[in-house]
Image: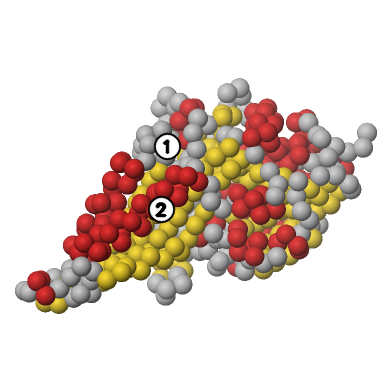
Amino acid sequence: MTTATTAGPLLSGLSDLLPDLTTLYKDLHAHPELSFQEHRTAGVVAGRLRAQGWEVTEGVGRTGVVGVLRSGDGPTVLLRADMDALPVEEETGLPYASTATAVTDDGREVPVMHACGHDVHVTALLGTTALLAARPDAWRGTVVAVFQPAEEVGGAPVMLEDGFADRFPRPDICLAQHTAPVPVGYAGSRPGTVMSSSDSLRVVLKGRGGHGSVPENTVDPVVLAASVVLRLQTVVSREVAAADMAVVTVGSLHTGTKENIIPDTAELKINIRADSPDVRRRVMEAVERVIRMESAVSGAAEPEIDHFQSYPITHNDPEATVRTGEILSAAMPGPGRFLMLPRPLTGSEDFGQFGQALGVPSVFWFFGTSDPALFTGFDPAALSSPPTGVPGSHSSRFAPLAAESVETGVRLMTTAAAHWLGAPDA
């Protein structure tokens, strides 16, 4: 197994690569694409990998790209970056800000923005792949570079369902990273649960419509929906222990077309997050119980409950995370810049499904990309909970520092990959 110093020969070429990588990042930022629509991005990735000398497979899980590079006998390491953007209108004012639009699956035209840092992830991994390809004499083993589509809607299981395990070398470890809205120069992770589970429900409440002048002849789904929303707020506060973590959010409620017409139905979209399988199960059961019982009390028909998206808990292998954290600490610009987070983040990820499906350990970490000038007296312990007012993931004002963020991402991913790959012969 290599040591942290093994990354030195690889990283010696980073300064020469950085101007081109920064230009690439700005290009990707200006041309975001929605989940499973990442055709341009995938083409850029595939072209660069081929030019570097990688074996390239396109169209994995619809729009995913996988590169394989070998340098003798040794461990196999999977490195993953996600490629998709979000239906958000950019308000950063950057000269390379996105003005792109796209059409969603349901036919709506929406603005599109890289508001979650996936453009940084792609650029950083392409920097790492370039460094690995340029110095095959500095490492031994096999690298599987995964450029994943649709993280925002669960693209990892789609790649796995597309025969990923049989089509590509089985890794000994899976590595990935994510931007964080904290100052450039800080990074962190934690062993065990690092990100929460996420389950999304689409609920149709079935009332009985009619004229607003005779509500007694109806079963009003608007009132029913209001009761459901309010009652759901008690699930966490009254059914989850204070020491546990859970979040229940009703993010969408649509019903009715006119002020004097009581509609037949109301549709809710609900998101549930938890930091343990047991809490996840209990909250899910409570949410469904509330929906069904409120419908019954209102005299409504049985509701439709559709589980349309699910992410399991993102679990970091404890031993591998501690080892990787020690190596990444040495790669940071000073002591105390790589932290072990005190608690899991309430956000969710699908990266962990690669390790779970393949039966190998995973390590996932975060690194800062924000301008330090935005912070006053930044507390490193707040890495998992950035200060109010700093634009974070999914914000229309999320604006990583370009060169600094890319440089950090390449340095961390390359250092971690080098550690888990084999050392060259003496």
Q: Tell me the element at label 2.
A: helix
Q: Nearer the viewer, residue 11 or 340?
A: 340
- The numbered mark at residue 284 is 2
Q: Amino acid at mark 2?
A: Met
Q: Residue at x 46, y 72 (%)?
A: 105
Q: Is residue 194 above or below residue 203?
A: above
Using a 10 Å C-alpha cutoff, classify the residue at mark 2 as few (fewer than 14 neighbours), some (14 to 19) or many (20 or more). Answer: some
The answer to whether residue 373 is left or right of residue 233 is right
Q: Tell me the element at label 1.
A: loop
Quadrant in which residue 303 is drawn? bottom left
- The numbered mark at residue 244 is 1
Where does the image place residue 239, in percent across and percent down from the top left? Answer: 34, 43
Where does the image place residue 341, in percent across and percent down from the top left? Answer: 53, 31
> Can you name the residue that lies furthest to the left here?
213
Where does the image place residue 420, in percent across and percent down from the top left? Answer: 76, 39
Q: Is residue 94 above or below residue 401?
A: below
| Residue 425 in view here | yes
Where does the image place residue 365, in percent across and percent down from the top left? Answer: 59, 39
Q: Residue at x 69, y 31 (%)?
A: 323
